Structure formats: C-alpha cells, structure tokens
Image: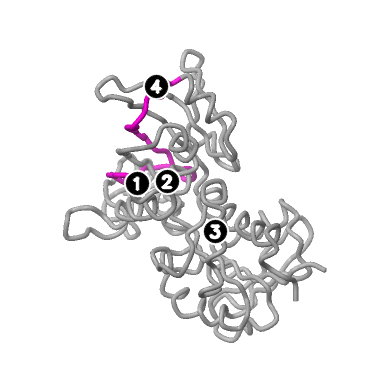
Amino acid sequence: MGYRVAVVGATGRVGGEMLNILDERQFDVDEVAAVASERSAGKEVSFGQDDVLKVQALDTFDFSGWDLALFSPGAKVSAEFAPKAAAAGCTVIDNTSQFRMDPDVPLVVPEVNADAIKGFTAKNIIANPNCSTIQMVVALKPLHDRAKIKRVVVSTYQSTSGGGSAAMDELFDQTKGIYSTVAPKPKQFPKQIAFNVIPHIDVFMEDGYTKEEWKMVAETKKILDPSIKLTATCVRVPVFVGHAESVNVEFENPLSADEARDILRESPGLMVVDSPADNGYVTPVDSAGESATFVSRIREDATVENGLNLWVVADNLRKGAALNSVQIAELLVTGKHLKAS
C-alpha cells in the first residue's frame, strides 16, 4: 500500500519541483494532491509524464487521511496551515523558514543528520533548511567528522530563483529592457539585478547582517555542531538557477587538500569536480537540473593553520529545496516512522 501525499504550494517553482522529484524517484504514492491558494484552485499542474492534477484550495483542503504533506507556500501560510495538517495526523515536511529554529522541530539534511528525524513526533513537523545552508553542510559534514571545524567564512552567490518566479521574471525583463528600451524598475529586488550583484537577501537585522546570513549561522549550528563559528555574506547574482558558495574553513586538526578531495569523493550527495587546469570546476549553469552538490577548487589556505578553501555549487530548487524534502520523506519511510493510511 502506498502513501497519500499532498504538495502545498504546488503552483510555485519549488512545489512543481517537488511533484517532479516524487515521480522521478518513484516515491511510493497511491494518491497525490496539488494544493495552493484559492486563486490557483482549478489550475492544472503536471505530475510525471502523463498525470495532470487539478489544484485544490488550501483553505478548504482536509488533511485527514493524508499521510504526508510537503509544504512550500511561504512562511506565513505554513505558520497557519502546517500545524492544522499535523494535528489532522498528516506528517508535514515544511520548506519555509517558519519552524526551522523551533526546538521541537527537527531541521534535517539526510546526508548530514538523519538521526534528528526521530524528533518529529513532538509536533509532527520536520523543517527543511535554507537552500544555501543545505549545500554547504553537505560538503562540510564529512570534513568536520575528520578534522573538526572551528570556523567558517562563507560568501554566497545566490540565483534569482531563490526569490521565486517573479524574481526570475524580473531578471529576464530587466536584461531585455537594457538591450531594447528602458529596463523596468526593481520590484522584487532592492536594486537592479540585471548585470549587477546585490549584497542584500531578506531583511537587515540590528547587527548589520541580513536574515539570510543569520539563517546560515543558526541553521549550521543546529544541524552540524553548535560549537562551529560561522560568518556569512549572502549575495544575489544575475543567474536563473543554481547557488554557488566560496567557503573558507578552519579546522582544529590538519587536513590536506588531497585528503579532503578523497573524503568528499566518497561522501553521499557530493560530486567532486576539481581539475582547474582543464576548466574542471562547476558553475551554477552546470548544476541546473542536477541532484548532487558539487565541490570544486579545493585548496589549502596558507594564511591560517589547518585551513581549506572550497567552491560549492548546487541547484537550489532541487537539493536546496524540493529534493531535500523528498529525501526526508524517504527517511520517514525507510525508518518506518510513517505508515500508509
């Protein structure tokens, strides 16, 4: 007997990718529901090659009898409806920021802290981390196990798809406008994104960091190790899909670049592409549509003791969101935490 799965936010970029990946990975489903806002009710979305689902309105959707709900409708919507779904007996995997720092909600990256999933019974909710955090901790985990990380300095190069479809459209429209007439004024971003980079993702906080930067710090501590010191600068770049990160890591113990390469090559979810002489490094364009987190340009940092530099790239819509959610669902099934209705 398969599972009854609802995808909430099914008309969005991440929701659509969740549907694709459920089909692609042949998740054991008996029934799938596409759920979104009332204004999207009645629209059709694809599930696999042949199936088309009619979108149902979240306001009136009854989660009773549904085994699993993958949520990606925005934090405010999740705050209202995820607890209702969980109370109805439907286990929620939430892709928004709403529950990530809740001590009663596990924050899970399957390759990193799969055992944390056991804590989901407190609220029947599991949180999916921020996209930029996910790809970084997948790369850091095996190195931390070997040499123990003291400090991380990360600068991100985050694509516009992290801001949703309207953000991607703004990049396209501004680029087209610059070449033809006049570029439209920014609406989704605080400044022009076409042919520009913006060191501002989410709101600024009192200490001068953005909330996106805070998320990377707080989530890494919760997922990987609270003793790790981390500082981040998060930047939006004129790319449609794929986040890249320049990661500088300081370890407690010696770790050479060669050993790090060997460790990363043998670690789950990772692919090492590191042959600079042959342009052997991965860019966001290369990562689009791929499930792996890619690590390139692994090299020793001579300015600190036991330091390494890494270039980490992933498709933010897949591993940074939808794929990680489905992998969590698979953990629930393989660990026998979820029983089909």
- Residue 14, numbered circle: 3
Secondary-structure class at tag 4: strand
Callout 3 amino acid = Val
Label 4 neighbour load within 10 Å: few <14, some 14-19, many 20+: some
Distance (Cα) linking label 3 and label 4: 33 Å
Label 1 neighbour load within 10 Å: few <14, some 14-19, many 20+: many
The answer to whether residue 67 is left or right of residue 96 is right
Query: Which is nearer the N-term, disc 3 or disc 2?
Result: 3
Label 3 neighbour load within 10 Å: few <14, some 14-19, many 20+: many
- Badges 3 and 2: C-beta atoms under 8 Å apart? no
Q: Is residue 239 magenta?
A: yes
Measuring 48% from the left and 22% from the top, which residue is drawn there? 259
Callout 2 amino acid = Ser
**Is 197 rendered above or below residue 3?**
above
- Residue 159, numbered circle: 2
Viewer-proximal residue, 58 or 255?
Answer: 255
Callout 4 amino acid = Arg
Callout 1 amino acid = Arg
Distance (Cα) linking label 2 and label 1: 6 Å
- Badges 2 and 1: C-beta atoms under 8 Å apart? yes
Distance (Cα) linking label 2 and label 4: 25 Å
Judging by the rendered image, the residue that carries numbered circle 1 is 236
Image quarter (top left, top right, bottom left or bottom right) of the N terminus: bottom right
Measuring 17% from the left and 56% from the top, which residue is drawn there? 207
